[in-house]
Amino acid sequence: MPDETTLEDDIRTLYRRAFEQYGSDALWNARPSENPSTLEALAITRALRTHGGMDGRRLAEEIERLCRAAHETAVPCSACSGGRPQL
């Protein structure tokens, strides 16, 4: 499994790709972040699914998959069930 830094880089790459490819169609009401967090990446997936067609849906699924993987490699959080935040 890739390390957390690699996953975060991959998430940022897909986040930027989403805005490049779907910004005016699916993400018109969102402002891109210079250094997006995992939560910011997850926040755009619904719009990609709804307004991005099948390719946007696939991109959303990939972002979500990478965010889950990054989350699983993160330090456990005591505020969440099972010691890890739920996505």
Image (cartoon, rainbow, N blue to C red):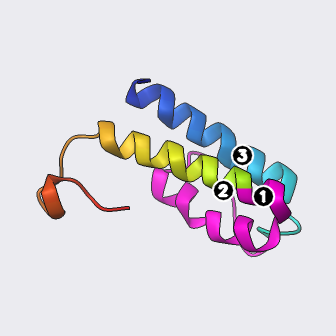
The quarter of the picture where residue 27 lies is bottom right
Q: Position of residue 21 (x, y in %)?
A: 86, 52
Q: Are marks 3 and 2 in contact (CB under 8 Å)?
A: no
Q: Is residue 21 above or below residue 31?
A: above
Q: Amino acid at mark 2?
A: Ala
Tell me the CA gap for discs 3 and 2.
12 Å
Residue at x 18% of width, y 46% of height:
76
Magenta run includes residue 71: no
Q: Which residue is mark 1?
A: 56
The type of residue carrying mark 3 is: Arg
Residue range in magenta is 28-57
Quadrant (top left, top right, bottom left, bottom right) of the C terminus: bottom left
Please state which of residues 11 and 65 is positioned toward the viewer in this rendering.
65
Residue 23 seen in the figure: no
Give the crowd class for mark 1: few <14, some 14-19, many >=20 residues within 10 Å: many
Query: Residue 14: x, y in percent?
Result: 67, 43
Q: Relative to residue 62, is residue 87 depicted above or below? A: below
Residue at which label 3 appears:
16
